[in-house]
Amino acid sequence: MLQQTPVSRVEPVWREWVARWPVPSAMAKTSVAEVLRAWGKLGYPRRAMRLHECATVLARDYGDEVPDDVETLLTLPGVGAYTARAIACFGYGQRVPVVDTNVRRVIARVVHGVADSAPSARDLRDAEELLPADNGARFSAALMELGALVCTARAPQCPVCPLSSCTWHEAGHPQLDAPARPVQKYAGTDRQVRGRLLDVLRGSSIPVTRAQLDVVWLSDIAQRDRALDSLLVDGLVEQTADGRFALAGEGG
């Protein structure tokens, strides 16, 4: 849930999920459609489908337990490199480097003396070299919090930084020569159209007509059709034999 979504939006939904589905087998018994409804407006709904697939695998193959090693975690549906390492580190306390945007920025400044850096193959190596022999999970969490609250991208709070040495600070805060990264927009994108179409389907207990979907986006018919087609291709939406539309698993 936290992939590309802030904690403030995730927390209330997460609390509802763990109360409703405390173990993987509980979710595995639920339809994909209900999981998509519970996902609500968190965005990137394919993540919800992958969670349902993952729960099914955990219930069937792992006795309702989440594996504790990175290599096994990487074989699970929807679990990528970051998520696998985060589970091993924060869930099981293993000495495993976990690198997000905040950690990458802290390391770039403290170790390499640059304002920020793009993702690279050296990220995990840099983070692992900093990890203490014990309390690796606590240290990794501290790096994330340092980047989120103190060593921020736009207004770093150097006077209150707990670190005694920082190469970037000592060099006078040199800025990047590269152009600023573009801010990802949402309004008017296919993602927004997909979200509106899914809202209609989540709010209906029966399949809906094409006309009910069409009214949610009248400004660009081609874009609306493209968004609906992509939902069908992704398996999030199904079309019934009579031409109506429903969430996955409810198309009959």
Image: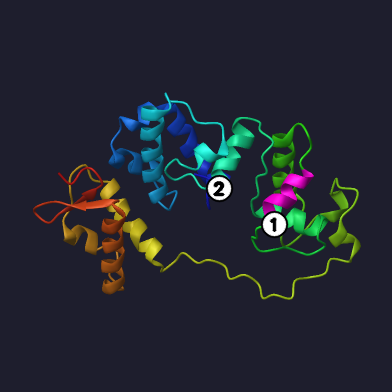
> What secondary structure is marked by label 1?
loop
Does residue 251 sit above or below 231 in this rendering? above
Residue 111 coordinates in the image, percent (x, y): 82, 56
Label 1 Cα crowd, 10 Å radius (few <14 / some 14-19 / many 20+): few
Residue located beneath label 1 in the image: 122
Residue type, numbered disc 2: Ala
SS at circle 2: helix
Using the image, tell me which numbered label, if any, was put on residue 81.
2
Residue 147 seen? no
Q: What is the span of residues highlighted in magenta in the rendered image?
A: 122-130
Measured as percent of width and height from the top left, residue 171 is found at 89, 65
Left/right placement of residue 128 relative to residue 85 reads right
Q: Is residue 50 visible?
A: yes
Which residue is found at the position 50% from the left and 37% from the top?
Answer: 72
128 left or right, relative to 76: right
Vertical side of 110 occupied by 143: above or below = above
User: Which residue appears at 29% of the width and 68% of the height?
Assistant: 226
